[in-house]
Structure formats: C-alpha cells, structure tokens
Image (tube, helix red, strand yellow):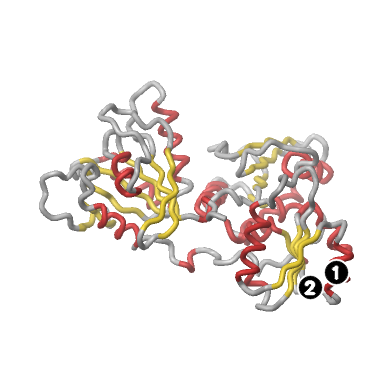
Amino acid sequence: MDMPRSERTRIIIIGRCNAGKSALANAIAGQEVAITSPVAGTTTDPVAKAVELPGLGACVITDTPGLDDGTPLGRQRMERTRQALNTADIAIIAAPRAECGELERRCAAELRRRGIPFITVATFMQHILSYQNHTWEDAPLVHANACTGKGIGKVVAALACLRPAPGDAPRTIAAHLVEPGGTVLLVMPQDAQAPKGRLILPQSQVLRELLGAGINALCCTPQTMPQALAALRRTPDLTITDSQAFREVDARLPRRARLTSFSILMARYKGDIAVLAEGARAIDALTPRSRVLIAEACAHVPQGEDIGRVQLPRLLRQRAGDGLGIDIVAGDAFPADLRGYSLVVHCGACMFNRAHMMARIRQAREQGVPITNYGVAIAYLQGILPRMVWE
C-alpha cells in the first residue's frame, strides 16, 4: 500500500504572481506538476503532487495561486493559498530575480507566526555564476533557475535541513502502548459506515504498525468479540475499538483491561491530546442556546448512523437539550471565525497531516474556543474517558 498523503512531508510554495512558483514546483519534482505561463493568475487553485526527494523521502509539493492576484477571483484564490498553508510542514517563498520586497516580508512574518520553517528561493537567476546559499529574514536564501534547473539541488538540500525532527510529533499511533510480543484486540464494526472491501485508514494504519512492531493483532467485530476473547485465553494487553462501540466493548472487558479507540489514538498522533481531552470538559457547560461545530477532515457521503452527522449530534443534544445548535463542515470548509461556537468537535483527522490538525487547534485556542475530538467527546459523554489510554 502506498504511503497515505497525510503521512508525507508537505512542501508549500507561495509568493507573488509570476514569481516562478509553478516552474519551481516542476523543477523540484522533476516532472510537470503545474502549468507555467507568463500570464498572471495562471495557477487558479493549489496543485499538489506526491514525489520522493533526496533527504526528505515521501513528500507532497503544492503550487499555489499568487498572493497579489488582482483578477476578479483573486480574493478567493488567495484564500485557497492561505488554506493550503494550514497543511504545510515546510514552505518556500518564491522571489523573482532576488526581489524580496514587502509581499515577501509579509509572507515570512506569516510563516513565522504559524511556526512553519521556510526557505526563500530567488528564481530566474539566469546570469549568476554561483548558486550559493545565503540568508534573508533569518532563513536560507537559495539562488536557483527554475527554468533551467540550475541550483535546484541546493533548494532540495536546504529543504531537507528543515525536515521536521522525529521528536516533533508522536512517532507511533499505538505501538508505544504494548511491548513486542504482546497482543492487541482490534474491534472494528462492519456496518453501513464501513467501506466495502477495505478497512478505514486508521484501522489499516494501526494494524500495519502493530505487525511491523512485532505485536500480535487479533481483529473482530463487536458481535464476535466474545469468541475472540475466548480464543485469546487471557485479557489482551490492549483493546482498540471504534468509538461507536465503546459501551459494548467496555462491558465485555474486565475493569482493569486497557481500552482506547482509533479516534483517540489519532487525536494524539495528529494533534494535541492534552488540549483535546481538556476541551471535552466544555460539554458540561453546553445549554440549549449553545452552538457546536462538528468538523470532518474528509468529505464522505454519510450513510446510516453516521458518527459525525447522527450519533454525535444525538449524544450532545441528549446532554445539553434539543435546542442545541449544531453546524457540520467537511474537508477544507472550516470557518475562519469560531467565536460563535461554545465547542468544536473534530474527527480523528486521518486524512490530514499533523500540521493541518495543529493549525485548527491553534486557531481554536487563539480565539478562546474549546476543541475536542470525536472519540474523546464520546468517551467523555459516556463517562469512560478516565479509562481510556493513549500514553
């Protein structure tokens, strides 16, 4: 199975119109990622391409519309660029002919505010003899010719120096919870929400990780869980379940058995589990006049008892009252202003990279709005969050 895009290092290229962003994306990728043209506004939406780069490994390069787009649709295009920045692990500011002006300085300031490491690439350098690295705004400045490819090797090398260190994010989803040779029971409902012929991404990622770590994994559904437990002859070292089966699974395990959910583990892996666990406490303060935002990373077509569109709203209204207002968004449709909400409940973000999820958590905290996660919220509502393990 190919590495999911959410696990690849995200490189975002930003800058003014006709700064050579598309040519630079093509030169780094070694193939045509985006259309190039001297016409301003040629790139109208972010264009992403999965590539393998020396020193960086699996990456996604994203070309973006210019930040000085004066066309009738310029405002919407620039907003798409700002949304793309939410996914960035690393950024490149493209500056034509080494002209680092006010727009480039604003870009650098915004990247520093977001905590995104970046380099600046002076593009179209046809006449210089040496493609050396310098600094600008306390970040690397690399001279390169995006059209001929000269200096692109130095661009890739400079990016590799900015690659997030392993300690910057949790390195495992679940393997840190069990010793090699241990046993994990994976409880995975196969109902209308389960995709036909495949596992959902968190389930397949956890299973693959456990096998790679030398940990035994036994898979079952809630209905076949008694037979699975009987086959093990002893309590598993850890049980991981889908959030919707919390109560059923909890009732079948000894009280001291270690239990968690795929969503809670993804909350730790993709976000800040401490912030999300604290955010769940805001559920107690909800009233029929409150408003809650439910946010999903993927834009799937809901089926049956959809967890985000049916189960969570029902559980929240049972606690706060039928008048509780609930808005649901999916994909990139995340409001810029969250201050009208008493709580944000986010999915496990398996389709997002960690930078994207952390950007949403940061946005909520900056605006003073509590944020939590599907699995954390359901466990809190059912009174079993203290029993959940993630560290």
Depth check, front residue: 109 or 72: 72
Picture coordinates of residue 15, whole percent (x, y): 32, 40
Instruction: Answer few, some or many: residues within 10 Å of disc 2's Cα (few below 14, many 20 plus, some between 14 and 19).
Output: many
Q: Is residue 247 left or right of residue 202?
A: right
* Above/below status of 33 relative to 252: above
Picture coordinates of residue 157, whole percent (x, y): 30, 60
Task: Tell which circle, 1 or 2, labels the residue nearer the N-terminal end.
Answer: 1
Picture coordinates of residue 323, whole percent (x, y): 79, 34
Instruction: Residue 287: tell me if it is visible.
Output: no
Identify the residue at image location x=70%, y=38%: 291
1 and 2 marks in contact (CB < 8 Å): yes
Residue 318, picture quadrant: top right
Q: Which residue is mark 2?
A: 236
Which element type, helix, strand or loop, lies under badge 1? helix
Identify the residue at image location x=34%, y=34%: 35
Depth check, front residue: 288 or 371: 371
Picture coordinates of residue 204, whole percent (x, y): 65, 57
Q: Quadrant of the N terminus?
A: bottom right
Which element type, helix, strand or loop, lies under badge 2? loop
* Above/below status of 193 relative to 245: above
Q: Quadrant of the C terminus?
A: bottom right
Q: Which residue is mark 1?
A: 229
Residue type marked 1: Leu
